[in-house]
Image (tube, rainbow, N blue to C red):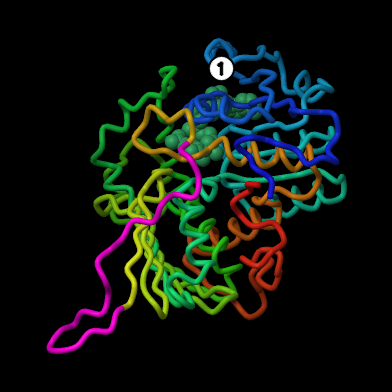
Amino acid sequence: MPNPETGRASSGAAQQQAVGLVFVGCGYAADFYGATLANYPQVDVKGAFDIDGERARTFVAEYGGRVYESLEAVLADPEVGIVANLTPVSQHHPVTKAALLTGKHVYSEKPLAPALDQATELVELAAERGLLLSSAPSTVFSRSAQTLVKAVGDGLIGAPRLAYANLDMGALAFMPYTEWRSRRGVPWPYMDEVPNGCVMEHAGYQLSWLIAMFGPVVRMAGHNALLLGHEWPTLTEVAPDVSFGFLEFANGAVCRISIGWVAPADMALTIVGDQGCLSVKDVWQASSPVLLQRRIKASGKTNGYLAEAEQLPFILPAAVHRYEDTHDLTVGAGIADMARAVLTGGQPFLSADFSLHILDVSLRLAEGRGVAEDVPLLHADDAKLAHGRETTPDGRG
Ligand SMILES: NC(=O)c1ccc[n+]([C@@H]2O[C@H](COP(=O)([O-])OP(=O)(O)OC[C@H]3O[C@@H](n4cnc5c(N)ncnc54)[C@H](O)[C@@H]3O)[C@@H](O)[C@H]2O)c1
């Protein structure tokens, strides 16, 4: 197995030891990336471009490389193998398309594109040109996620049957979001995030873990509501702020998913199996403990049937650089896994099809719809997305 954190290539790998990377878009989220890339020697940061030149300048001053004067200059540089598209969502499709058309692999921030037809066009373009395309989030590479995925795969709770997945971040409208700043002082862009909505911003954090464990979603329903829209009087567009979904996966497991920014924070994931339960309290924390409760034989007048929770040892070390933030999102690991795939061949774990499937499910949740007979879920029957796929999700050796 390859390892995104050491970048060790197989013996058959080309001489190249690292892949050139340029960041396009150096706003709030870019600081998450910059602070972690030193973990991944297979990634060589060449620099950054932002339409706001000052942001590109402060980014390279902090994290290395040079300022590129234009997107064209980035795409014309033969030393650039991967473009990390960290622009606002409205720019994801044009920037990614331009990069693919000039032969660059692209790692895009979430979502891959705001509309399914745009994302499908990008996936097809990448396939035609033999290029790699991934979309964030990459928290599935966290040591919490990897420990959980392995525990489920190893059968520690028997057959997984049910998951409860929450991505309620707390009541955003009541938080001091106008004061949030990244490490370089970039303000948090609520005017983009709130219209994008809680689902398009956050569903992928839970969906990527669930799909890695259970395979693709094959049946689903979603509903949503806008409860605190009046709290955003300066915004002309506000997306639903709570969403509830029912998901059924290829392996037969089902999930109740809740995503929102109204209820108090709850980012837990619980997996219920025939032989016990596994849980992670916070999927936004790379080192959130993974707890196992085994089923026990009880007797007498009791409702109990689970043993005391035991914390599983992490199967991976902690990343060296942590975020100076309230959440630890393992952001660099997806780019590192793409660089590993460039160097050694094959696909990144967050393949174009995997990313497209997550977008498809997210859009259905965001729009409060299920699977119509005539609009089957994309890649729902694609065995490559299932947990039994050739490349297991840890991306490690
Ligand atoms: N804000 C967060 O907490 C967060 C966390 C994880 C992921 N994300 C994702 O990261 C992406 C960027 O979000 P952000 O919060 O950094 O936004 P941001 O607005 O702070 O930064 C985006 C940057 O892109 C630049 N830009 C805009 N159009 C461009 C173009 N065509 N070419 C080059 N640069 C361009 C802007 O000048 C800005 O500096 C989004 O997809 C978002 O969903 C955000």
Camera-side residue of 226 and 189: 189
Disc 1 residue type (three-letter):
Tyr
- At 77% across and 18% down in the image, what residue appears? 73
Instruction: Measuring from the top left, give residue 70's x and y in whole percent.
Output: 72, 18
Q: Is residue 331 above or below residue 140?
A: above
Is disc 1 surrounded by few (<14), some (14 to 19) or many (20+) residues within 10 Å? Answer: some
Depth check: give the residue in front, 369 or 276.
276
Residue farthest toward the left in the current orientation of the protein? 301
Q: Is residue 311 left or right of residue 349?
A: left
Which residue does the numbered mark 1 point to in the structure image? 63
Which x, y percent locates residue 392? 64, 57
Q: Is residue 329 magenta?
A: no
Q: Mark 1: is the Cβ under 8 angstroms from ligand 1?
A: no
Q: Position of residue 274 (x, y in %)?
A: 41, 80
The residue drawn where x is 47% and y is 66% is 368
Q: How many marks?
A: 1
Q: Answer whether residue 192 is visible to the viewer in this image.
A: no
> In the image as oriented, which residue stretches furthest toward the bottom?
300
Is residue 303 at least partly visible in the picture?
yes
Q: Determine if the magenta segment contains residue 300.
A: yes
State the residue in front, 296 or 68: 296
- In the picture provided, is 280 more to the left or to the right than 85? left
Figure check: 390 above or below 170: below
> Start and end of the magenta stretch?
296-318
Where is residue 297 shown, x and y percent of the image? Answer: 28, 84
> Tag 1, which secondary structure?
helix
Q: Nearer the viewer, residue 347 or 368?
A: 347
Q: Main secondary structure of the magenta part?
A: loop
